[in-house]
Image (spheres, helix red, strand yellow):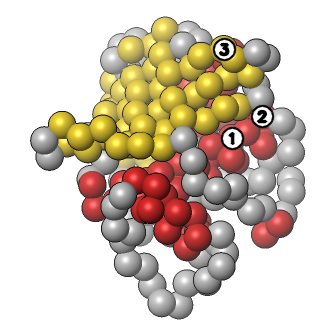
């Protein structure tokens, strides 16, 4: 495993907001260097989710109708969401709810890699934080799939990471939203 202290996230990119009244959806697009089949497995297999995702799954997300418990990692209070996979079309589309919020993953082959698009409706007060968090999670997934894992970085621990303030501010600017305030004792970059 690579020391996560040596990791520096790239700049904020590939994100925008879709607004439908009071409902805001973060749309985050990432180019990955892995095939859709490999990325699909990372999105649906509980063992692989434990490598990078902000939640653990007690079952596979690979089948429409699957009932799965998603347990948020790193939250001050354990948060468990019962979810049903509403759409699973391997290796192209995955849809489910996480904590009452819609999640849609779309995978498109691009050369030998994948264009991964995430739609996640999220409380607009935390949309920049969500974008920065998913950015780091997807970096961790990409590294794990490449065989150079960083180890999971999620929840309050990620906010202690030196690159977090910069990334959060960049996504707030990119998305045209205010960055949520955060503790003054957190590291600055």
Based on the displayed image, in which of its 4 quarters is residue 42 positioned?
Answer: top right
Mark 1 vs mark 3, CA separation in Å = 17 Å
Residue at image point 77% right, 53% down: 150
Q: Residue furthest top?
A: 89
Residue at image point 65% right, 69% down: 163
Q: Under tag 1, what secondary structure?
A: helix
Name the disc covering residue 109, or none: 3
Residue 70 visible to an observer of this rendering: no
Q: Under tag 3, what secondary structure?
A: strand
Q: Under tag 2, what secondary structure?
A: helix
Q: Would residue 2 be found to the left or right of residue 185 on screen?
A: right
Q: Counting other residues with Cα less than 10 Å from the Cα at mark 1, is it few (<14), some (14-19), or many (20 or more)?
A: many
Q: Report which residue position mark 1 lands on.
A: 141
Q: Residue furthest bottom?
A: 185
Residue 84 against residue 119 in the figure, above or below: above
Mark earlier in primary sequence (1, 3): 3
Residue at image point 37% right, 65% down: 77
Q: Would residue 96 be found to the left or right of residue 42 on screen?
A: left
Residue 31 visible to an observer of this rendering: yes
Based on the displayed image, in which of its 4 quarters is residue 153 positioned?
Answer: bottom right
Foreground of the two, 120 or 45:
120
Query: Residue 47, how many percent across, how many down?
Result: 66, 34
Mark earlier in primary sequence (2, 3): 3
Q: Report which residue position mark 2 lands on.
A: 145
Residue 154 against residue 57 in the figure, above or below: below
Mark 2 vs mark 3, CA separation in Å = 16 Å
Foreground of the two, 118 or 156:
118
> Which dot, 1 or 3, sits closer to the camera?
3
Q: Are marks 1 and 3 in contact (CB under 8 Å)?
A: no
Q: Would residue 1 be found to the left or right of residue 127 on screen?
A: right
Query: Residue 182, how many percent across, how many down?
Result: 42, 79
């Amino acid at each position: 495993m690579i020391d996560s202290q040596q990791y520096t996230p790239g700049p904020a990119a590939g994100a925008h907001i879709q607004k439908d009244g009071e409902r805001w959806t973060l749309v985050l697009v990432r180019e990955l260097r892995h095939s859709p089949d490999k990325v699909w497995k990372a999105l649906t297999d509980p063992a692989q989710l434990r490598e990078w995702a902000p939640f653990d799954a007690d079952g596979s997300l690979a089948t429409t109708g699957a009932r799965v418990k998603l347990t948020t990692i790193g939250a001050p209070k354990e948060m468990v969401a019962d979810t049903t996979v509403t759409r699973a079309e391997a290796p192209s589309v995955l849809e489910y709810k996480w904590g009452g919020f819609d999640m849609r993953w779309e995978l498109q082959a691009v050369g030998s890699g994948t264009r991964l698009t995430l739609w996640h409706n999220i409380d607009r007060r935390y949309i920049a934080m969500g974008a920065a968090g998913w950015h780091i999670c997807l970096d961790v997934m990409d590294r794990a799939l490449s065989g150079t894992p960083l180890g999971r970085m999620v929840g309050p621990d990620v906010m202690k990471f030196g690159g977090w303030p910069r990334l959060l501010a960049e996504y707030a600017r990119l998305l045209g939203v205010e960055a949520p305030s955060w503790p003054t004792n957190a590291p600055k970059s």
